[in-house]
Image: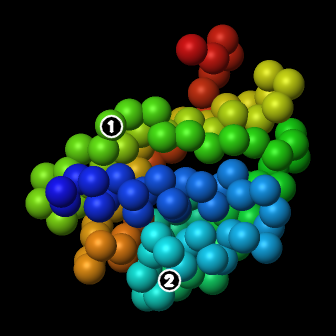
């Protein structure tokens, strides 16, 4: 049951990257993250949903075009920590990012995200 809850929060978080409109991003993040979420991203540590929203919106505005974020592994959850692999693909064979996120859950919401990721070199497999 705990893995199902984590998977739901993670998939809602990922759906913010794929929202049909920027106006939906905050609502989706609010369903997945605690208000005091700590986000360890490529640019360092930030706190709060607004900080994560800025990161998501920046990635949605990738110079190569609007991309797609997908979870590409099962959610592995020992106790209150979970990890999963992801891939971000830009259109027309543009750059791809991939990585592993480690998240901590509190009261069924993500309260910490640690991002490990980077560009994939072509050919993308």
Where residue 14 appears, as percent x and y from the top left, is: 55, 54
Pick the residue in front: 28 or 67. 28
Label pair 2/1, CB-CB below 8 angstroms? no
Q: Quadrant of residue 38?
A: bottom left
Q: Which mark is residue 47?
A: 2
Query: How far apart are the two marked residues, 2 and 1, measured between alpha carbons?
Result: 27 Å
Where residue 60 appears, as percent x and y from the top left, is: 76, 55
Tag nearer the camera, 2 or 1: 1
Q: For the C terminus, which image quadrant?
A: top right
Query: Residue drawn at (30%, 44%), measured in percent from left and top?
Result: 75
Q: Mark yes or no: residue 112 visible.
A: no
Total marks shown come to: 2
Q: Answer left or right for 94 relative to 123.
A: right
Q: How is the image coloured?
A: rainbow
Query: Residue drawn at (39%, 58%), measured in percent from left and top?
Result: 8
Disc 1: which residue: 74
Disc 1 crowd, CA 10 A, few/some/many (<14, 14-19, 20+): few
Q: Quadrant of residue 2?
A: bottom left
Instruction: Give the SS element for disc 2.
Output: strand
Pick the residue in front: 58 or 66. 66
Q: Answer left or right for 36 relative to 98.
A: left
Q: Which mark is residue 54?
A: none
Query: Residue drawn at (56%, 40%), measured in percent from left and top?
Result: 70
Instruction: Give the SS element for disc 1.
Output: loop
């Amino acid at each position: 049951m705990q893995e199902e809850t984590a998977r739901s929060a993670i998939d809602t978080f990922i759906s913010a990257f794929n929202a049909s409109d920027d106006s939906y991003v905050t609502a989706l993040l609010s369903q997945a993250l605690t208000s005091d979420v700590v986000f360890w991203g490529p640019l360092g540590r930030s706190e709060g949903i607004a900080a994560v929203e800025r990161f998501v919106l920046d990635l949605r505005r990738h110079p190569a075009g609007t991309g797609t974020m997908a979870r590409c592994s099962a959610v592995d959850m020992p106790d209150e920590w979970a990890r999963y692999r992801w891939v971000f693909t830009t259109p027309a064979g543009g750059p791809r990012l991939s990585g592993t996120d480690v998240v901590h859950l509190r009261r069924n919401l993500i309260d910490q995200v640690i991002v490990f990721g980077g560009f994939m070199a072509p050919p993308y497999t």
